[in-house]
Image (spheres, rainbow, N blue to C red):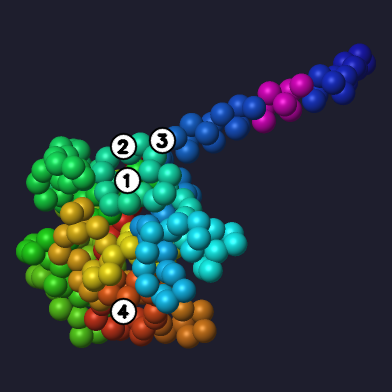
Amino acid sequence: MHILPALPVFSRLSALRSALTLTSALLLWASAVQAAPTGLLNDTGQTQCANASNALVACDSATTGDAGTRPRQDGRFGRDVAAPAKVGGGAAGFDFTPLDINGNAIALTGSPAVPATTPRCVKDNVTNLIWEVKTTSGLQNSSYTYAWRSNVGAATCGASVSPCNTDALIAAMNAANLCGETANNWRLPTRRELLSLVHWGLTASPKIDANYFPATQSARYWTNDTFAPSTTNAWTVRFDTSLTSNGPKTNSTYVRLVRSGS
């Protein structure tokens, strides 16, 4: 019986290399189609620095330089200071594109640029996340509160969501195809994602760019992260103090949903 010779080692390596190259290309294509979050972080919005008396002043070298009285403060660094060109608008280093109910970009007007009409969603051009914008009525009513995920508590929300928990809200938002979303991708944000909207440079609450996120409550908003020391609690982000905290998953708490951009 005639036996075919085995392929040379270099031939097998070449075939393996070709397969790996194809696999990598397919993974890159899939990533592009899904338009996943960039993994980048927003800057804080803080453009001033504290002097020796704890008063907020311009970030000059005498105060915040490496040899200054309060060196290397946040206001010296990042997008807020670099002021790169933006795709959209927004305070400090934030870069937002407002969207209408169908997911179309809303024109910007004025200087600094603000949405010409009230948005229903906002795309963050740094993180590639799309956020719902709260309103004063309907499914996105800013006054509604929810229990965390499938929990049930004393929360109050509209008739289109029952029970008043975040799982039911997500289902209703996906059914509504808000801002052109048809892939059922609305979800609770992680703590880090929700913190990316906090504008630390504001002295009054809510600590968020109100031109792009009107009707925001100066209060806690749920994240998807369970509080590890006590798993009956979940993490929240506060838009009154800019800080994170945690509370029982049955609490009545505000919500802002998010999805990956496109």
* Residue at the image point whose x is 43% and y is 58% from the top: 59
Where on the picture, by quarter, is residue 36? top left
Q: Could you tell me residue 205's position as x and y percent?
A: 24, 71
Q: Could you tell me residue 111's position as x and y percent?
A: 18, 42
The mark nearer the N terminus, 3 or 4, is 3
Residue 182 can be seen, yes or no: no
Residue behind mark 4: 151
Magenta span of residues: 14-20
Residue behind mark 2: 87
Q: Assess whether residue 16 is covered by the magenta stretch.
A: yes
Residue behind mark 3: 33
Label 3, label 4: how many angstroms apart (C-alpha)? 34 Å
Q: Amino acid at mark 4?
A: Asn
Contact between marks 1 and 2 (CB within 8 A): the answer is yes
Q: Could you tell me residue 185's position as x and y percent?
A: 32, 52
Label 3, label 1: how many angstroms apart (C-alpha)? 22 Å
| Element class at badge 2 | loop
